[in-house]
Amino acid sequence: MPAVTRVCCIGAGYVGGPTCAVIALKCPHIKVTIVDLNQSRIDAWNSPNYNLPIYEPGLEDVVRQARDRNLFFTTDIDRSIQEADLIFVSVNTPTKKSGVGAGFAADLNYVESATRRIAKVATSNKIVVEKSTVPCRTAESMRTILEANSRPNCRFDILSNPEFLAEGTAINDLFKPDRVLIGSLQTPEGITASNALVEIYANWIPKERILTVGLWSSELSKLAANAMLAQRISSVNALSAICEATGANIDEVAHAVGYDSRIGPRFLRASVGFGGSCFQKDILNLVYLSESLHLPEVAEYWKQVVVMNEYQKRRFSKTVVDTLFNTITGKRIAVLGFAFKADTGDTRESAAITLVRDFLLEKAHVSIYDPQVEHTQIWTDLSDALPLVPLHNLQKQVDIASSAFDCCKNAEAVVIATEWREFREIDWEAVYRGMNKPAFVFDGRLLVDAQKLRSIGFKVTVIGRGERF
Ligand code: NAD
Ligand code: UDX
């Protein structure tokens, strides 16, 4: 098989955009075209002032170097498919909202329509790469669709190449991944296709970090990695509840536990609950897969990771209400951070949405500040979370501040929902002066120096710490 010289990526989102921009940067001999149905997203990728559709540290620099050199963004999907030797399918795979498997199974509609489009328009052989996170054996369905709908003499080899980048560190993760995983059928054709993809990554990634495995193992490994990462967070969050009840300190417990080289220190940070577009969706997907395979105990085991995460969010909002003398009606609550983690403007499944919703249901007045999230996104998320409340009513109960300081003015309580670095540098004395008294701080991200805040006069509650006020 000749080396790949033209790559198409279907889906210009959080994964397709950064991943294929980095491929273009590192492989100047390959023409990379990223396509999407969404014109405004493509326009943003092409914007002359680099007003890109996603915020990701380092991304702009990559796009500046490669765009219009060998990196292109377009809605001309058909032409890009026809030109390409290798096509990444990097479309969204959200949890199904209705029908069989609703609430658990992945909605593969976008994967299927991208696959059908490839089958319909391709006029030459293609390597089709699943980049989206999909249930085990999705490649088989893709093959069936491609083979049933393609022109004669068009051959398709399907690979699985799940993406392990995390938002906020995507560029670094793509430059120096722990590993790249490529799954293929273990046939001579499958292995040849796999080698063609290995050669692309080998332009900047040491070969020993490029793992080649069977198709089904590759698909399942992605779900497994996310489930195991999320499981660590739910485990530490479950322990944080015990810490609060006993007077132990979750930082100290996590430190002591993580010092064991068999366990390791990462992903043991107690929080108000994990968010993001992947963890919950992928675990629910694994639960559904386990149930479909008649493995109810396995399904129940993984489901508990999500149950614990929901419990953690509720537990935190209940602590706020309980601490503010069992009512927050009419009280002003300042929520610092709305993104699901620092260094991203993404709010998908952000714990902050659940917290704000709970506060609004208690009839509080909520002010929100996030350094990256678009205001329109906040309104969309709150409207989705409270579908029965008209937007103009929401806007009476919520305001969006332009700084952390403004957000906290006249508030009874400050709730830290996202671990943005700038929240570490807040002038707490000035914030204290501007707040109603007693002034409460609820730290859901282990971010503040609780003793220092207490010395100023705040009443401080930190997740996973027994001592209060
Ligand atoms: P996203 O919603 O940001 O982007 C998906 C894009 O695909 C959208 O812009 C959408 O318009 C486009 N699209 C959908 N159907 C299309 C079609 N038929 N033709 C052309 N364009 C189409 O999603 P994302 O966050 O980039 O995630 C993509 C996949 O990668 C998902 O399966 C996700 O689980 C997986 N993943 C995401 C992350 C992450 O951090 N976001 C990390 C690893 C893996
Ligand atoms: C995750 C996986 O890390 C990544 O490999 C996969 O490709 C996509 O899903 P992402 O969701 O972007 O990445 O961010 P991640 O850093 O994993 O954080 C997910 C959530 O867990 C965030 O809300 C974060 O704040 C939370 N978290 C993370 C904790 O609460 N504690 C931790 O110790 C780590």
Image (cartoon, rainbow, N blue to C red):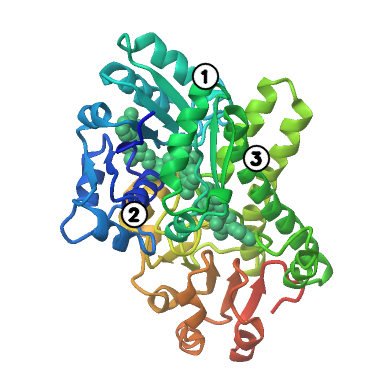
> Which residue is the site of mark 1?
140
Q: Circle 2 sits in a helix, a strand or a loop, which is it?
A: loop
Image quarter in which the C terminus is found? bottom right
Q: Position of residue 66 (x, y in %)?
A: 26, 55
Q: Residues within 10 Å of mark 3 (few under 14, many from 20)?
A: some
Asked if the residue under mark 1 is in contact with the one under mark 2, i.e. CB atoms within 8 Å, the reply is: no
State the residue in front, 287 or 314.
287
Image quarter in which the N terminus is found? top left
212 shown above or below 138: below
* Marked residue nearer the N-terminal end (2 or 1): 2
> Which residue is the site of mark 2?
54
Q: Position of residue 185 (x, y in %)?
A: 55, 24
Displayed-image quarter of ligand 2: bottom right
Between the C-alphas of marks 2 and 1, the distance is 32 Å
Between the C-alphas of marks 3 and 2, the distance is 27 Å
Q: Residues within 10 Å of mark 2 (few under 14, many from 20)?
A: many
Q: Circle 1 sits in a helix, a strand or a loop, which is it?
A: helix
State the residue in front, 140 or 6.
6
Q: Which mark is residue 224?
A: 3
Q: Residues within 10 Å of mark 1 (few under 14, many from 20)?
A: few
Q: Which mark is residue 429?
A: none
